[in-house]
Amino acid sequence: MAVLLRLHHCNRRAGCTMELPGFAVAVWMFACFRASVVGYPNGRVREACTSMVPCHGSSPQLSPEHTITVNGTEFKPGDNIEVHLSGPDFEGFFIQARDAEHLDSPAVGSFVLADWRRSQLLTCGRTKNSAVSHTSKAKKKDIKVYWIAPEDAPKHVQFLATVVKKYRIFWVKIPGPIVSQPNVLSPTPPLHATSAPMSTSHPASYISKPFSASGCGITKFCIRNPTNCDPGSASCFFLSFQQEASSVFIEMSGPSEGYLAFAFSQDQWMGGDDAYLCVNVDHRIHVSTAHLKERSHPLLDVENALEDVSWRLADGVLQCSFRRGIRLPAYKERFNLDTSYYIFLADGEASEGGLLYKHHRQPLVTNGPYNVTGLPQDIGGSRAPRLIKAHGALMFVAWIATVSIGVIVARFFKPVWNHSFLFGKELWFQVHRMLMLTTVMLTSISFVLPFVYRGGWSQQAGFHPYLGCAVMALTIFQPLMAGFRPSRHAPRRQLFNWFHWSTGTTARILAVVTMFLGMDLPALDLPDPWDTYAMIGFVAWHVGTDVLLEIHSYCLVRKVEVIEDDRVQILQSLTSAEAEGRLFKQIVLTIYVCGNVVFLVAFLIAINQV
């Protein structure tokens, strides 16, 4: 979908519909939803009047490619100023004039179009025709409009433009020239666009060699993944903090050619966090601070509080280092570093222009809050939350161990254990029932854990939660149906057997599919492709064992012979034939259980290491 500028305050305005009639509310909600998905290829973007930010789910580009020019530097009320926006092909734009000394103030003056086919007038706030935008997503290289100075114009006016090259490639509030009324002083201090590209406050130097972990836990606080890895290796994520008087020197490195980022957080969730990014832009590393607002792209800061910035990009390893004060009262979004926080460490890809893409795996998160200026420590972290690890582990125990063994016992060990009893019931039935009830218990506990972790339904997990709900429903239905099992010789017993088998088989198939999908979700993300091969191996192991026992049962049935003239004389009954295979089946069951334990241990070890 070609989306240029998205409704920026839809949710806030949707709250005003409470007083509308029901049908109007539905229409308005549909309009808001459609706006947020389809966007504004027609350029009607009045909702972005204040911020000039297109809500495209990504960060603005770093260095503008487009320029704004005017045909004069002075104006009087009522004068016309020609404004020209030009640069490489772009699809959307949004132009305003604002008080140069208060760029957050509303738009001033009005515009007149030079080409009504490619541009249109919009009303921002109470000022009619105070902004100009595109009429379609057709590519264009330049736009010309005329600005009319109002009677109450401020002393200095600056032109700003947001330009959309493609849906996720855009620049916000590109600064244009400042025009002033006659006989007024130049504006001070120098003005900047409110969406300045990522940059450092001081010139960056080059790091000559990999970082060292020699002082970790002694003179500096370190986070390493894998635990105790060497920062010089191509697979080690490294983050260190070393206090020096009233500042902290920070080093970060890891295998990435896109970006590395870390953040201080007051909890284990993204949102309201103090973030630091090292981004590869055209083979140069740009270091910036940012603010994380919920699960969205970082909001880059205009001013940077970092000093002594250095970087290195070699052999696929990105390194950056910088210094910041322990307390930065002038920067409201920066946390004080003499307090304990959870620490996030993430990596991902970036476009050639510095556009950040979402990290393709779960960020590394410390197991608890830490004070990086306190006692030096050398710790690791986990890319999978503990509740999600427990969810995966319990599901693997239930559907790799207990349910699989329970099915084999019920299907092939009735004749073998038919004369053995436990608590007044056949042994095979008691073993089967115990394993299946354990499966129900483990699945029920595991089912609740992701909801506890997420605080509700997850919109990021694809089909996994939907299939998981189906498995949970079948898991509960199966023992309930078993409670109404007819007697062995009842007419409906065959119908019950068929439903019991089909429900259990469907649940097992869905459980395997659900586990396949869950292993690669960011919250768990087992090693790939090992996890896929291991799960395929388990399925093959189970199916192979099932087929082997089926063939064995068929061979025993063939031992029934027909002799003499009466045509039918059973020398061996089916029950006695099955009894002859007792040893074989017990050997197969023992090997099968051992194999399941091997698969289960392998998965549990993998879960523990993520």
Image (cartoon, rainbow, N blue to C red):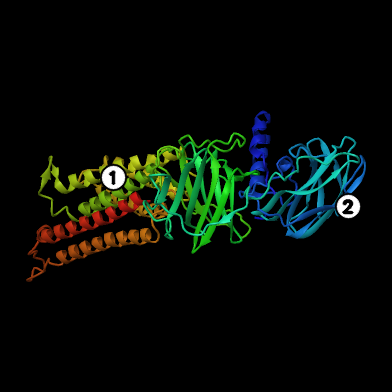
**Residue 313 seen in render:** yes
Q: Residue at x 67, y 42 (%)?
A: 8
* Disc 2, SS: loop
Measuring from the top left, give residue 385's x and y in whole percent: 40, 44
Q: On the rendered structure, is 287 left or right of 438?
A: right
* In this view, 118 is above or below 330: below
Q: How many marks overall?
A: 2
Disc 2 residue type (three-letter) = Asn
* Disc 1, SS: helix
Q: On the rendered structure, is 164 left or right of 482?
A: right
Q: Nearer the viewer, residue 605 or 510?
A: 605
Mark sitting earlier along the chain (1/2): 2
The residue to which callout 1 is attached is: 439
Q: Nearer the viewer, mark 1 or mark 2?
A: 2
Cβ atoms at labels 1 and 2 below 8 Å apart: no
The residue to which callout 2 is attached is: 71
* In this view, 271 is above or below 229: above
| Label 1 environment density (alpha carbons within 10 Å; few <14, some 14–19, many ≥20) | many
Disc 1 residue type (three-letter) = Thr
Q: Residue at x 31, y 59 (%)?
A: 539
* In this view, 14 is above or below 277: above
Measuring from the top left, give residue 349's x and y in whole percent: 54, 57
Q: Residue at x 92, y 44 (%)?
A: 79
**Residue 459 seen in render:** no
